[in-house]
Image (cartoon, rainbow, N blue to C red):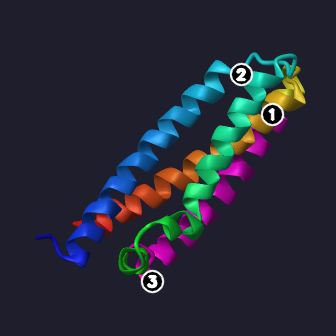
Amino acid sequence: MMTNIEAAERKSRARAIVFLLMAIALIAATWMNSNDTGEQPVRLGTWLAMVALVALNLTPFAMRRARAPLASLLNDETTQVHRQQSFGAGFWASLAASASLAIVASAVPITALFAVKVVIAAAMVAALVSFAVQELRAAR
C-alpha cells in the first residue's frame, strides 16, 4: 500500500505534467482564436473559461478537493514558494508581452482583443511552465 507521502509525490509529478499540457493547450487555443474579432462570443467565452480554469489550478484552492492529509502534503512550503515564483514569472512575461505588442502595434495595427489574449496567454503559460519545471526539479 502506498503511503501518503508517496501518493503526494506521485500526484505532484502528475500535476506538473498536467500543467505543461495545459500550457500547450492554452498556446494552441490562443493561436487558433488569434483571428477572432469578438464577433463569436462563444469562442471567446470558451477561451476565457479555459483561462479561468487554468488560473484556478495555479492557486492553492485547487488542492482543497484532495483528501486533507494529501492536500497539506501537496501544498507544502516548497510548493508555496514555487507557486509564488511562478506568479512572478507570469508577471514578467505579461510585461514582456505588453512591451512587445506595443512595438508591433506601432508598425502593424492589432486589435485590443488580440493584444489582451496574447498578454494573458503569455502570463499564464509562463506561470504554468515555471511552476511545473520547479515541481519536477524538486521531485528528483
How far across and down, in percent of the image, does residue 59 sit? 59, 65
Q: Which quarter of the rendered picture does the N terminus lie within?
A: bottom left
The residue under label 2 is which amino acid type? Ser
For disc 1, the marked residue is: 115
Q: Farthest residue in the bottom direction?
A: 77
Residue at the spot x=85%, y=23% of the render?
Answer: 110
Residue at the spot x=63%, y=19% of the render?
Answer: 32
Q: Find numbered disc 3 in the image and state the secondary structure of the residue it sits on.
A: helix
How far across and down, in percent of the image, does residue 135 sit? 37, 64
Magenta highlight range: 74-102
For disc 3, the marked residue is: 77
The residue under label 3 is which amino acid type? Glu
| Labels 3, 1: front one | 3
Q: Is residue 105 left or right of residue 92?
A: right
Quarter where residue 92 is shown: bottom right
Closer to us: 2 or 118: 2
